[in-house]
Image (cartoon, rainbow, N blue to C red):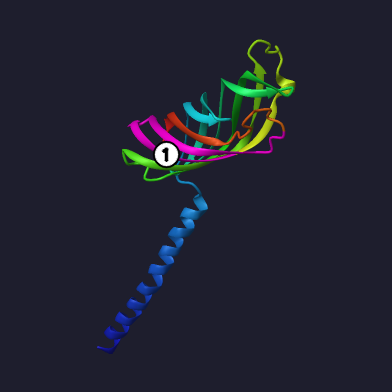
Amino acid sequence: MRITALRRVVVALAALTVVPLSAQAQDEYLLSNGPRDIGGFGGPLYRVTSVAGETMSLGGGGGAMLINRRFAIGGMGVGGTSNVDAILGGVPVRGEMDFGYGGLTLEVITRPSKLVHATYGVLLGGGGVSVWPDDRRPRNVSDETETFGVAEPQLGLEVNIVRFMRVGVTGGYRFVFGAEDARLVNDNLSGASGSLVFRFGKF
């Protein structure tokens, strides 16, 4: 009887020791293997934003590497042309503005298996703006472009259409810094934006 009771105690202690070790080994296995799933996507986007007090349409595209279906690291760029009120040589004129920006994108995708799910992201990069009178636009505007930095947080909703395609809408605000001479009546290049985004790839 004493031997049987002793065996039971030994077995119980062994079980209590093995369970934590098994859990620890499993955690170490997951950490050592790194990301369990790597994918990627790319596609076009259409953005409406406010630039220097004017509503402006921008077109562009982007892509990213997708880690564990929830974290995306990539890049994007958008650009467009619009008419604005500008001051050139101290004289107010109606001018044509070229505006564009892009950079690194970081994004978190919540509950990606759901039909509709939320996304949270930010763009960090830079861009350029040029303004010219409509009747005397030079052929080469590269030397006249004003550059600036951009930080643009975004919040969106995404819909799973098929396995390789998603469509999303996003809203955000573009913070512009570092522009020294934008030559605009309203030189605030920061502004709200809304986008329609198409993504194709492995999710």
Question: In the rendered image, is residue 69 in sight?
Answer: no
Q: Is residue 192 left or right of residue 86?
A: left
> In this rendering, would 135 be left or right of 105?
right
Is residue 118 among what the camera can see? Answer: yes
Magenta segment includes 16:
no
Q: Residue at x 69, y 38 (%)?
A: 178
Mark 1 surroundings: few (<14), some (14-19) or many (≥20) residues within 10 A: some
The residue at 65%/19% (across/down) is 93
Name the residue: 52% across, 53% down. Answer: 32
Q: Nearer the viewer, residue 186 or 16?
A: 186
State the extent of the magenta-drawn residues as a range.
Answer: 151-180
User: Which quadrant, please, contains the C terminus?
Assistant: top left
Left or right side of 104 for 159: left
- 102 vs 41, nearest the viewer: 102
User: Residue 10 in the image: x percent, y percent?
Assistant: 35, 80
Q: Which residue is the site of mark 1?
A: 156
Mark 1: secondary structure: strand
Q: How many marks?
A: 1
Q: Residue furthest front?
A: 91
- Residue 187 horizontal side relative to residue 180, left or right: left
Quarter occupied by residue 75: top right
Predominant secondary structure in magenta?
A: strand
Q: Quadrant of residue 15?
A: bottom left
Coordinates of residue 103 in the picture (x, y in percent) = 60, 34
Q: Is residue 173 magenta?
A: yes
Name which quarter of the figure residue 70 lies in. Answer: top left
Q: Please, what is the three-letter code of the amino acid marked with disc 1? A: Gly
At which x and y percent is residue 196?
Answer: 43, 29
Q: Give the image location of residue 31, x and y in percent.
A: 50, 54
Q: Residue at x 52, y 39 (%)?
A: 173
- Residue 56 sits above or below residue 121 on the image: above
Q: Looking at this view, is 21 or 99 the one in front?
A: 99
